[in-house]
Image (spheres, helix red, strand yellow):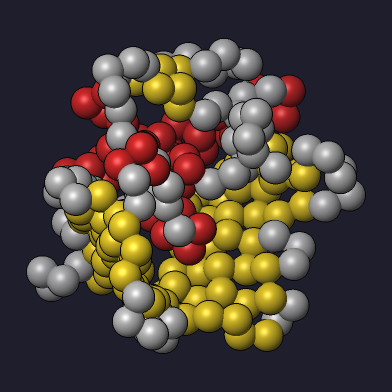
Amino acid sequence: MIFAGSTLSVKSSQCVVLSPLVCSGEHKRVPTVIEDAMNDQNSFGAMLAIISAVRDARIGPALMATVVTTRSGVLRSVATARVSLGDRLWSLTDEHSASAFHPESGWTISHSDGVVETLPRERDDWIPPRLRLFFPLSLPIWGEQMDSWRVIDAEVSGGDAHLRFQHKENAEFFGQATIDLEWGIATEFTEPWERTTLQDIKSPWQ
């Protein structure tokens, strides 16, 4: 496993482990945050723990959770999420719409007014922001070209890894995320203006 400012690639068969991206044979870049701040041994160990947990999640059980989003402390939305990494099935349902992904049919979005949308198959890599917590490496915090944030510190405490990140354009903005190392998912993603958490996490099989 390579860090220290380099990139790590995985073959297409592994892509579902890291994000819901659909691979087309080429190698996909796994985001690495290892710059100056990541040279700390504790941060390095935390990043290894996160990658290990995310990889293990592919053989873990399907999960369901309540996704709660607040903005400036005010409740913004509550949704129910169901994700099965092994089967590549995931869905998100709230009072306004229901989004679901199936590997054969792609994305279907059903709105409360009865309108049903299907996304073109080339949009299979799209994922609702609130579902990204189930795919920690798809969070926009790894300093890649399209990311707004860059992780500057990571540590493991108990069964969680705690990340602190800084805005790439506005260095006065900071955020944090918590990765559950048992499930391999993010249970908290906090920006200065918005916070999203996963609550009541469980397996439908339990």
Quarter-of-image position of residue 118: bottom left
**Residue 5, position in %: x, y?**
62, 16
Frontmost residue, 3 versus 99: 99
Quarter-of-image position of residue 95: bottom left
Q: Residue at x 34, y 63 (%)?
A: 117
Quarter-of-image position of residue 140: top right
**Residue 85, position in %: x, y?**
23, 48
User: In this rendering, is residue 66 above or below 186?
Assistant: below
Using residue 58 as the reference point, say whether residue 98 is left or right of it: right
Q: Residue furthest left?
A: 205
Using residue 107 as the reference point, say whether residue 171 is left or right of it: right
Frontmost residue, 154 versus 85: 85
Using residue 187 as the reference point, say whether residue 175 is left or right of it: right
Q: Quadrant of the C terminus?
A: bottom left
**Residue 145, position in %: x, y?**
65, 29
Q: Residue at x 76, y 63 (%)?
A: 192
Q: Residue at x 15, y 46 (%)?
A: 104
User: In this rendering, is residue 32 above or below 25?
Assistant: below
User: In this rendering, is residue 190 above or below 19?
Assistant: below
The answer to whether residue 106 is visible is yes
**Residue 73, position in %: x, y?**
70, 81
The answer to whether residue 60 is visible is no
Tag count in the figure? 0
Using residue 101 as the reference point, say whether residue 9 is left or right of it: right
